[in-house]
Image: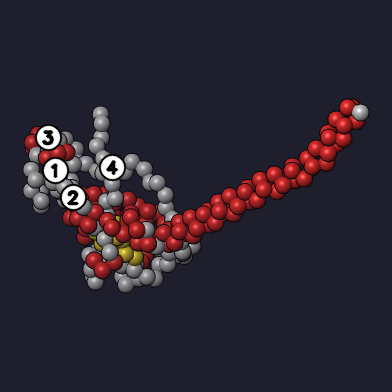
């Protein structure tokens, strides 16, 4: 009788066990699906935000605070060749005037005045569409603009922007520069459409970050 009572009690618990397990599994699945749904929604929103920022960097609220607005673009940008020539005149190649350049080199970064992104904002125009002679130099043999030539110009344009960013109180603004600018690397290059050879190209750039070189 005792054994029979125990068996009946045990059988009763076994019959309720599948229901309890089923309820727990169902609840667990609902929690997992809810978390997965929130994760998918968040991921989708992040992708949409990232896509909108890539198409228009000014939509990024952080960059909007520090990036010059489109209203600051001049109606007539100077020619890229003129900007490059003006900077090259201030660069001395070789060992000549080394003592003079060393004398106007700032002793530390602390001696340089603070600069903002807008201080280095630079615009330049490559008149591919409006100047037939320039168009001939920039036209590829398969049609369209020469991408390699444009990448080279962007590299030189980056140096122009950096030289505009540098404000050395120890040197003449129109004289030789005590600084040398080299290209360390290019992080990425996005080409969103075909570059035509019958339209002018405008270059716009500014310094986004500076650091201290530890030797």
Residue with the mark numbered 1: 112
Instruction: Point out the tag, 3 or 2, that comes first from the N-terminus.
Output: 3
Within 10 Å of the Cα at label 3, are there few (<14), some (14-19), or many (20+) other Cα atoms? few
Residue with the mark numbered 4: 182
Mark 1 and 2 residues: CB-CB less than 8 Å, in contact? yes
Marks 3/1: CA–CA distance = 9 Å
Residue at the spot 40% in from the left edge and 67% down from the top edge: 197
**Image height of 28 relative to 144, above or below:** above
* Nearer to the camera, 39 or 112: 39
Within 10 Å of the Cα at label 2, are there few (<14), some (14-19), or many (20+) other Cα atoms? few
Residue at the spot 51% in from the left edge and 54% down from the top edge: 42
Residue at the spot 7% in from the left edge and 43% down from the top edge: 170
Residue at the spot 42% in from the left edge and 49% down from the top edge: 188
Q: Secondary structure at mark 4?
A: loop
Q: Secondary structure at mark 3?
A: loop
Marks 4/2: CA–CA distance = 20 Å
Instruction: Point out the tag, 4 or 2, that comes first from the N-terminus.
Output: 2
């Amino acid at each position: 009788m005792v054994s029979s009572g125990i068996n009946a009690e045990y059988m009763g618990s076994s019959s309720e066990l599948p229901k309890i397990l089923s309820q727990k599994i169902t609840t667990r699945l609902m929690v997992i699906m809810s978390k997965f749904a929130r994760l998918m929604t968040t991921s989708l929103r992040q992708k949409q935000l990232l896509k909108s920022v890539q198409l228009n960097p000014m939509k990024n609220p952080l960059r909007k605070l520090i990036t010059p607005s489109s209203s600051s673009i001049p109606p007539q940008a100077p020619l890229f060749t003129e900007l490059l020539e003006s900077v090259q005149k201030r660069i001395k190649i070789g060992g000549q005037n080394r003592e003079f350049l060393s004398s106007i080199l700032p002793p530390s970064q602390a001696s340089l005045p603070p600069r903002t992104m807008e201080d280095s904002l630079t615009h330049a125009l490559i008149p591919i569409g409006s100047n037939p002679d320039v168009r001939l130099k920039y036209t590829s043999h398969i049609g369209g603009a020469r991408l390699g030539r444009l990448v080279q110009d962007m590299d030189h344009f980056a140096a122009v922007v950096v030289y505009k960013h540098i404000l050395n109180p120890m040197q003449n603004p129109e004289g030789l520069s005590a600084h040398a600018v080299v290209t360390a690397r290019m992080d990425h290059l996005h080409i969103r459409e075909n570059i035509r050879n019958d339209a002018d190209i405008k270059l716009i750039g500014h310094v986004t970050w500076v650091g201290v070189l530890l030797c």
